[in-house]
Amino acid sequence: MTAVGRKLWAIPEGYIPGESFSRDRRFVSHETACVLNTGDAPARVKLMVYFSDRDPAGPYLFTVAPRRTLHLRFNDLADPEPIPVNTDYASLFESNVPVIVQHTRLDARDPHVALLSTIAFPVDQEGGLG
Amino acid sequence: MTAVGRKLWAIPEGYIPGESFSRDRRFVSHETACVLNTGDAPARVKLMVYFSDRDPAGPYLFTVAPRRTLHLRFNDLADPEPIPVNTDYASLFESNVPVIVQHTRLDARDPHVALLSTIAFPVDQEGGLG
Amino acid sequence: MTAVGRKLWAIPEGYIPGESFSRDRRFVSHETACVLNTGDAPARVKLMVYFSDRDPAGPYLFTVAPRRTLHLRFNDLADPEPIPVNTDYASLFESNVPVIVQHTRLDARDPHVALLSTIAFPVDQEGGLG
Amino acid sequence: MTAVGRKLWAIPEGYIPGESFSRDRRFVSHETACVLNTGDAPARVKLMVYFSDRDPAGPYLFTVAPRRTLHLRFNDLADPEPIPVNTDYASLFESNVPVIVQHTRLDARDPHVALLSTIAFPVDQEGGLG
């Protein structure tokens, strides 16, 4: 199977609510970048995180195995630094092979949760994270 | 009427909540792939489902009749195997004619339901599921 | 100002919940197609509605005035026939000038409402509704 | 780092609910345009807001600093005029450099909030706001 998708994806929205009604991982407020790698080679991804009032954080490095999906929680990022809660951010993903990226938030500040999701923006231009 | 859309679509997000507040089909937590076939020929679709820690499941085969829409619940898939609940997955749809695909989740773990939806990603590259 | 966007748009998802907690128009469960016409000429739009088990309904005809947006509720459609509630449908919009279309649902079966939204799919192929 | 994205973006949906269960800024019903500027130059953006029954408002002018994201609340717009609540609107963003735009609503009329989000529509045509 061929790898399908694009190599550069952007998600301008980002916000992890700082409260959760539960400590159950399923019900902790979180944001996720769902990455699908349909190809036969590992997808090595560099993630940069942008803020409103400081320099970007990153690169965060992760791998999506061949023919696998990785639903990466921004909450779980630690190296080089965690993503702060209650803070506006945005993200840019650069993969060495084509992948597809979707953005989802679960807002569990209240037991009656809210959801949002969108396919990320596939950037047409070729380019690296410098 | 001409068939419009694309032949290859991807949805990186996938997660069927394992609980529902009701057994009414309308209020069972579910994920749906809405497929629109505007053309005069049946759309024969092959669906592959990807996971984080095992080989993909499928192909699942289904048909969307001419000038019809099919709102396919992932919960209803059985052959070759059901989709597990509380499990991250992703999906790839390949149709023999152009169609349009949209992804929706109803989270009914709580009576105050939550929704998400997005047009799926139309993969530009031609290619088969092998 | 030039008209921007596309002339043919598809929304595979469609479902108007049959119940609402209120009769206030703001809180009646509904689906909306938001159409933006940035140009200086009226946008004359033909809408076809597709179902899972019957022939399409339409065309529904409406106009979006120059430099205006119209947030069209599917619930309000009457000619040639109303859209049934609790029923899967899909929609295809054809405009004589470029417009942009976004799809939104308010699910108000419960007072704690749920929302979904996505930009509709801009169909690349030129073509008419026959 | 190169600026990535597009220069002209549209969001046909727009509606700020007129009520909020709280005065905490986090829980005031709002709509946001999240703009990501990955480049090394400031993004100077002109925003026009369209209505159903009157001429457009604007231009609203704002800047997104290099390598920053701005999550602009429509509620905060004041010059040349505020955006009315409980009113259908749409928006068009024109930037002097490529950016990426995402649209989000938090409906906090009820303490059990609802969310929607979508990447905005990247208009292919070049053109100005006149």
Image: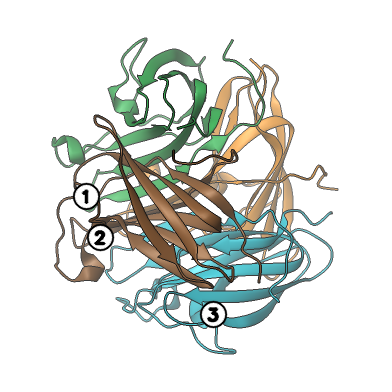
Chain colours: A orange, B green, C brown, D cyan
Indicate the amino acid at tag 3. Answer: Pro
Kind of element beneath mark 3: loop
Q: Could you give the CA–CA distance between mark 1 and mark 2, rounded to whole angstroms? A: 10 Å
Q: Position of residue B34 (x, y in %)?
A: 38, 35
Indicate the amino acid at tag 1. Answer: Glu
On residue D56, the disc is 3
**Between residues A10 and B2, which one lies in front from this camera angle?**
B2
Residue A47 found in image quarter = top right
Q: Residue at coordinates 42% horizontally, 64% vertically from top-left?
A: C63
Q: Is residue D75 above or below residue B101?
A: below
Indicate the amino acid at tag 2. Answer: Asp
Residue D78 found in image quarter = bottom right
Query: Which chain letter matches label 3?
Result: D
* Side of A35 relative to B42 (left or right): right
How many dots with numbers? 3
Q: Position of residue B15 (x, y in %)?
A: 39, 34
**Between residues A40 and A110, which one lies in front from this camera angle?**
A40
Q: Position of residue C73 (x, y in %)?
A: 31, 60
Query: Which chain letter matches label 1?
Result: C
Q: Could you give the CA–CA distance between mark 2 and mark 3, rounded to whole angstroms? A: 25 Å
Q: Is residue C40 above or below residue C31?
A: below
Residue picked out by circle 2: C76
Q: Residue at coordinates 70% horizontally, 73% vertically from top-left?
A: D45
* Side of C52 relative to C65 (left or right): left
Q: Is residue A104 visible?
A: no
Q: Position of residue B2 (x, y in %)?
A: 49, 31
Q: Is residue C35 visible?
A: yes
Residue picked out by circle 1: C81
